[in-house]
Structures are given as C-alpha cells and as structure tokens.
Image (spheres, grey):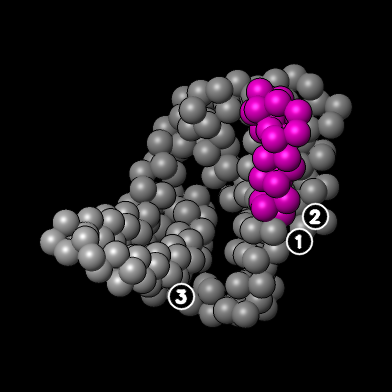
Amino acid sequence: MLGDSFAYTKDAIVGKWKQYLLFLIATLLLTIPLLGYSLKVFRGEKPAPEVDGWGTLIIDGIKYAIISIIWVIPCFIIAMFVIGAGILAYVENPAALVEIIGGVLIGIVVLLIVAAITGLFATIGVIRFARTGSMGEAFNFSAIIETIGRIGWVNYIIAMIVIIIVEMVFIGVIEALNFIVSPYLGLFIEFLLLAPLTLLMSRYFCLIYDSADST
C-alpha cells in the first residue's frame, strides 16, 4: 500500500508542474481546498484527479475540517480537564507538586490513548463521508467498527503505525533543517512537500479502507 501511494503521488506531481502549482495554491489557502481534494482521493479516483472545481474543493474541505473538529472534541475536553485540575490542585496545595505532576502525566497518557482511538475511528469516518456524501456517516460507529473488523484490527493498527513513521521521518527532516541550516529553509520545504505528503497519506488511507472489501 505504501509503494502504491508513493507511485500515485509521483504520477500526480512529477512532470505536472501546472498541477503542482495548483497544489501549492491550495496549501496557501489554509489547506482547506487540499482537504477537499483529499476527499476526491478517498473516493478511490485513480489516477490522481485534477485540481479543479475550486468551489467544491473549498466546501468539501470545510466539511472535512468540521468532521475533524467534532472527532477531536473528546481529546479537547480531556486536555482541558487535565490542565484545569492540575492548576486547581496546585493553587490549593503547592506543596503537593510531585503528586500533581504525576496526576497530570496520567492524564496525558489517557489523552494519548483516547487520541489514538478517535484517530482510528475518525479516519474511517471521513472516508465514509467521502464515499456516501453524508456527514452523518462520518459518525456511524456501528458501520465504522464493522469496516475496521473486516480490515482486521491488527492489520489496521500496523498500517497506521507505518504511516505515522513516515510522518515522523518527514517531521524529523524538517526539524533537522530548521536546526542545522535555517528555520526559514525548513518552513519553505515543508510548504513544498505538504501537498505531496497529504496526497500520499490520502491514497494510503483509501487503500486501507478498500482492503475491507478485498478481505
């Protein structure tokens, strides 16, 4: 799947400078059109679709952003609770700083677990929205669980770990450039590569989703 995603992205970018320029414009527009384009990829279009229909891209991108925000609400609530409880505990008893830090660390672990779980569900949910056109399907828990079950929970988690490693390598290169050369160079390269990385990940998630049917 990773090899297919790299080839898919290469075919959409290499030698197609006009399309790549449109990708950069989409990135400049707060990445909203880029999110809308991702939905086209999620629908299984192959080869990579053209960057056109900007009105639709923007509207779909806004819907994608809204769905993502809704999915992240549980993490936001937990984060606010952990921070608020930690501050309140410190104000009431500053001497118990070690215990407070321990409690906050436990809260962070819980937050990371919830974030991982919601991320697994949200990815399938967004693709369901792309395929059906219904935002409600992005939160159809029974259908999402059924899809993940057909993919295989172990297969799905391993596949997500692989793409996370790819992201970490990308971030690591950018941070290295920021530290060794110049933060401006790192930001510039990040700007140039954000669209190709988004395209690669979108194709990868699409293949994960379609593997449910193949199994």
User: Horizontally, is 92 left or right of 54 in the view?
Assistant: left
Q: Which mark is residue 1?
A: 1
Out of 189 and 212, give the one closest to the viewer: 189
Q: Is residue 77 visible?
A: no
Find disc 2 in the rendering and name its residue. Answer: 4
- Image location (x, y in percent) of residue 68: 41, 49
Q: CA distance from mark 2 to mark 3?
A: 25 Å
Q: Quadrant of residue 158?
A: bottom right
Q: Earlier in the sequence, mark 3 or mark 1?
A: 1
User: Horizontally, is 71 left or right of 130 in the view?
Assistant: left
Mark 1 Cα-neighbour bin, 10 Å: few <14, some 14–19, many ≥20: some
Residue 66 forms part of the magenta stretch: no
Q: CA distance from mark 3 to mark 1?
A: 21 Å
Q: Amino acid at mark 1?
A: Met
Find disc 3 in the rendering and name its residue. Answer: 145
Provide the major secondary structure of the magenta segment: helix
Q: Is residue 196 above or below residue 142?
A: above
